[in-house]
């Protein structure tokens, strides 16, 4: 099995990387990879979490984190989401459509390809699963 989460979008040649994954995979092996959807608002999930943390003092915090530290971290992630959009405009980051992910998977030699919307409502990403014949 190979898992590649939110990586292909940052690569100059994602098809080459996926093809190499397939090459080293045993027959019958599975690859799971994900990508943010085109026109996604990557800050939406973080904004929802931020509102909840700021508005509901009963929200349990992860061990070792203070509310202010967590809020500061979420704000930083929101800014990072905006940076992804800038990178996409500069052709340094690719948001793949469902069809583009399917084509990448097929060209790499995967079969039985399934692609699912994921990460929130509305979905923010696609999770793709393919098998080596």
Image (tube, rainbow, N blue to C red):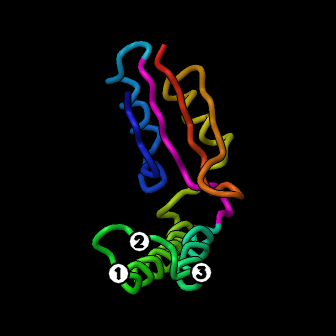
Q: Does the magenta stretch include residue 31?
A: yes
In the image, residue 48 sits, relative to residue 9, either above or below, namely below
Q: Name the residue under label 2.
A: 61
Residue 28 to residue 71: above or below: above
Pick whichever of labels 1 and 2 is earlier in the sequence. Answer: 2
**Furthest residue to the right?**
122
Q: Label 3 belongs to which residue?
A: 51
Picture residue at 49% right of the left edge, 28% below the top: 108
Q: What residue did someone put label 1 on?
A: 66
| Image marks 1 and 2: residues in contact by CB distance under 8 Å | yes
Give the magenta part as a residue range. Answer: 29-40
Where residue 49 appears, as percent x and y from the top left, is 55, 73
Q: Is residue 35 magenta?
A: yes
Using the image as rendered, state which of residue 53 and residue 90 is in the foreground: 53
| Foreground tag (3 vs 2) | 2
Circle 3/circle 2 CB separation < 8 Å: no
Q: Distance between the residues labelled 1 and 2?
A: 7 Å
Residue 123 position, x and y percent, is 67, 54
Residue 3 left/right relative to 53: left
Q: Position of residue 98 (x, y in %)?
A: 67, 43
**Crowd class of label 1 (few under 14; some 14 to 19; many from 20; radius 10 Å):** few
Comparing 106 with 57, the one in front is: 57
**Alpha-carbon distance for marks 3 and 1?**
16 Å
Of labels 3 and 1, the one closer to you: 1
The residue that appears at 47% across and 82% down in the rendered structure is 75
Disc 2 on helix, strand or loop? loop
Q: Residue at x 51, y 69 (%)?
A: 84
| Element class at badge 3 | helix
Label 3 – label 2 distance at C-alpha: 14 Å
Measured as percent of width and height from the top left, residue 69 is found at 36, 82
Disc with the residue nearer the chain's start (3 vs 2) = 3
């Amino acid at each position: 099995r190979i898992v590649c989460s939110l990586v292909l979008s940052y690569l100059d040649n994602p098809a080459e990387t996926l093809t190499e994954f397939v090459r080293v995979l045993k027959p019958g092996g599975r690859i799971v990879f994900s990508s943010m959807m085109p026109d996604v608002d990557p800050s939406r999930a973080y904004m929802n979490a931020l509102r909840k943390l700021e508005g509901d003092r009963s929200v349990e915090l992860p061990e070792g984190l203070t509310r202010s530290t967590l809020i500061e971290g979420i704000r930083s992630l929101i800014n990072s989401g905006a940076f992804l959009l800038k990178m996409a405009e500069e052709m340094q980051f690719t948001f793949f459509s469902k069809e583009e992910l399917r084509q990448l998977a097929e060209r790499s030699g995967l079969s039985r390809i399934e692609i699912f919307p994921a990460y929130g409502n509305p979905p923010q990403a696609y999770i793709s699963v393919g098998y080596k014949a």
